[in-house]
Structures are given as structure tokens and as C-alpha cells.
């Protein structure tokens, strides 16, 4: 294992992006998101993902010099055209308008189009929730999940995130795939020679399997059966037709199979508790959080990530040598 500070990890990823044709601003915003996932203990979206990012730059699928365009389509409707680049620079370009719109109108509906999303959704909404705003995020992916009762991959893992602001603490945020586990977890298991739990996926013939390589060649399953399948369907519609972007199977049809992120869209909904509910929102929500936390063994979503982050920022983080070596080889 190699030991890195947060800044050292960010610099490593940044330099790799720049060496492969990314502009400084695009490289910086994307590198910060990658390093933050690593610091938060989410290795499946951390430095492990860098080779995929780089393959998409080298293949020409993703533009490293993209300049996102942000436009107001209606008083509370914003479109962000990512210009064929990665999602983090598009979010950075739109953030101030999104926050201002939600605070003035009570709601901001944001459609991100022509982007390539490969990171965790909590990174998209945490800075917004820190502005005393509530946020939802939805995005799709390449076909990886079979619909309930089906045997072939159709939906993306289709994650969604929800964040709630806290006056004297970091936002409460959950970020979860519509599949039983995130696809990155299956990829890590395949890399490390581990097996998956029963019920995570099926092989190419539709038979249950715990072999992560067989699952990657077959399909993952939605969490909770038909309930997760319905949520995956909802995310497909919200991150596709609603904002004028492709569905997961359409993204697959135009993807060059370089192993990097697919083209897709993301829907961001931002609400102002101050404008909608009034000044008492924080007191009310803290009552609920307190009731949860007072139960032994219970915790709020994101508490473990924040604890990991604090430890990483203070003590640094250990990253597998194989991951670091791959990144250095790409520079």
C-alpha cells in the first residue's frame, strides 16, 4: 500500500489527467472528486476509476478541453451542456446559478446533458446542500441491471442521491444504486478474486451466480426485486427523456466500449426549505435525526463517510500499489 495525503492523491490524479489532454480546470475539478471518493472510503469510485477516465480521453470519446455551457430555460429550469466533457466541470460551472435560482425561486430543476458521469453522486450535491438547500440527483449508466423477472441487462445501475442540509453539521446525504450493490463493487471483487453475496447478480444465461466475473458478463439484480426495478425505471426516465438525453441501452449503442464512462444525462432537483417550509425546518429535521442517533447501532447516512474523510484528511490514506502504478504508467 502507498500512503498519500489528500493533496498528494489529488495532485497524482490531476497530473495524470493533464498528461492525457485535460485542460487544467477540467483536470482539477475531476481530480478533486476522485480523490474525495478515495478519502471517504469509497474505493470503487476513487483512484481505481482513473484508468477508465484516461481510456475515454485517449479514445477521443470525452473532450478534455470541454467548456460547459449553462443556460436558464425558464425561471427555475436550468440546462447545462457539458460539451462532451466529464461531469464534475459541468457541475462546477453551474453551481452558483443553481444555488441562486433555488434560493430565489424555491426550486431549481437542472438537466445536465452531453456529459460523461463516472463519479459518486454525493459529490454533486454536497456543496449545494451546504448552502442550506435540499437536493436530489439521478443519473443512468450502460445496461447492467436486469428488470425484475428479466434475465438480460437493460437498466443502468441508475443511482440516486438525496441530501438534506444541517445548520451545525455536514449535510445528511445518501447515495445508492438501484442495483443490490454498486457496479464498482463487483468490479473490485473481480479484480481481487472475491465472491459476491447471493442475490447480487446472474450470469449470461440468467442463472444466479456469486462469481463477479460472471455477473459482469451477465447482469446485476435490482435491490428489493420489483421495488428496485421500478426505481431504476424512474431514474431512466428522469435522467433520459425528461431532460432530452439518451436511455441506458441507447448510450450503449453509441459507446465505443473503451471502458470509460458512457454519455448520458443527470437530473438535479434543488429545493429551498427556507422558501418552501419556513424557518423551522432545521429544528424539525434535527428532532428526527436525534431520534435516529439515540438508538444504539443506528447512524445517519454519510456519517461513516464523513468519519473516513476526517481521518484521511488528518492521517492520509493508503492506496494499493497496483492502483498507483497503473496511474503512473498512464502519465
Image (tube, grey):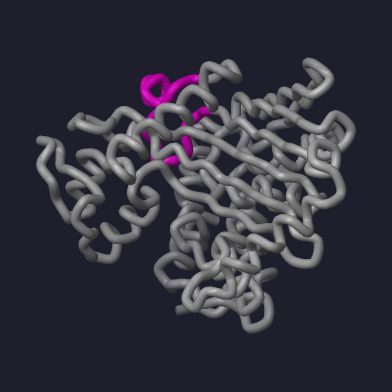
Q: Residue 243's image quarter?
A: top right
Q: Where residue 294 sits: x, y (%)? A: 58, 75
Q: Is residue 10 above or below residue 204?
A: below
- State whether residue 125 appears in this view: yes
Q: Which of 250/99 is in front?
A: 99
Q: Where residue 225 sits: x, y (%)? A: 28, 40
Q: Is residue 239 above or below residue 216?
A: above
Q: Which of 285/78 is in front?
A: 285
Q: Residue 103's image quarter?
A: top right
Q: Is residue 311 above or below residue 104?
A: below
Q: Where residue 278 sits: x, y (%)? A: 85, 43
Q: Which of 307/331 is in front?
A: 307
Q: Residue 276's image quarter?
A: top right
- State whether residue 39 appears in this view: no
Q: Is residue 11 magenta?
A: no
In the image, taking residue 192 as reference, residue 280 lies left or right, namely right
Identify the image quadrant of the N terminus: bottom left
Identify the residue shown where x is 47% and y is 33%.
Answer: 140
Q: Which of 315/164 is in front?
A: 164
Q: Where residue 231 sits: x, y (%)? A: 42, 34
Amino acid at each position: 500500500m502507498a500512503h498519500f495525503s489528500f493533496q498528494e492523491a489529488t495532485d497524482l490524479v490531476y497530473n495524470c489527467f493533464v498528461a492525457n489532454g485535460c485542460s487544467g480546470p477540467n483536470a482539477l475539478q475531476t481530480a478533486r472528486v476522485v480523490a474525495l471518493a478515495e478519502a471517504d472510503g469509497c474505493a470503487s469510485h476513487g483512484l481505481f476509476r482513473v484508468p477508465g477516465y484516461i481510456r475515454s480521453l485517449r479514445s477521443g470519446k470525452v473532450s478534455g478541453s470541454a467548456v460547459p455551457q449553462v443556460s436558464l430555460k425558464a425561471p427555475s429550469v436550468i440546462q447545462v451542456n457539458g460539451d462532451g466533457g466529464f461531469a464534475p466541470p459541468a457541475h462546477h460551472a453551474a453551481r452558483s446559478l443553481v444555488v441562486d435560482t433555488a434560493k430565489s425561486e424555491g426550486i431549481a430543476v437542472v438537466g445536465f446533458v452531453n456529459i460523461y458521469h463516472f463519479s459518486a453522486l454525493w459529490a454533486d450535491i454536497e456543496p449545494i446542500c451546504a448552502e442550506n438547500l435540499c437536493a436530489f440527483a439521478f443519473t443512468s449508466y450502460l445496461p447492467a441491471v436486469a428488470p425484475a423477472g428479466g434475465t438480460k441487462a437493460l437498466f443502468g445501475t441508475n443511482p440516486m442521491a438525496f441530501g438534506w442540509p444541517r445548520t451545525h453539521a455536514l449535510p445528511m446525504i445518501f447515495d445508492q444504486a438501484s442495483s443490490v450493490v454498486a457496479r464498482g463493487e463487483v468490479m473490485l471483487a473481480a479484480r481481487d478474486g472475491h465472491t459476491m453475496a447471493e442475490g447480487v447478480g446472474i450470469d449470461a444465461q440468467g442463472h444466479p451466480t456469486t462469481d463477479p466475473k460472471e455477473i459482469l458478463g451477465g447482469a446485476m439484480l435490482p435491490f428489493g426485486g420489483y421495488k428496485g426495478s421500478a426505481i431504476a425505471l424512474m431514474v431512466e426516465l428522469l435522467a433520459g427523456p425528461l431532460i432530452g438525453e439518451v436511455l441506458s441501452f441507447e448510450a450503449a449503442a453509441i459507446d465505443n466500449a473503451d471502458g470509460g464512462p458512457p454519455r448520458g444525462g443527470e437530473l438535479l432537483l434543488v429545493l429551498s426549505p427556507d422558501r418552501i417550509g419556513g424557518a423551522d425546518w432545521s429544528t424539525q429535521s434535527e428532532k428526527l435525526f436525534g431520534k435516529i442517533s439515540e438508538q444504539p447501532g443506528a447512524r445517519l447516512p454519510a456519517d461513516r463517510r464523513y468519519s473516513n474523510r476526517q481521518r484521511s484528511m488528518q492521517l492520509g490514506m493508503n492506496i494499493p500499489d497496483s492502483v498507483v502504478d497503473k496511474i503512473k504508467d498512464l502519465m
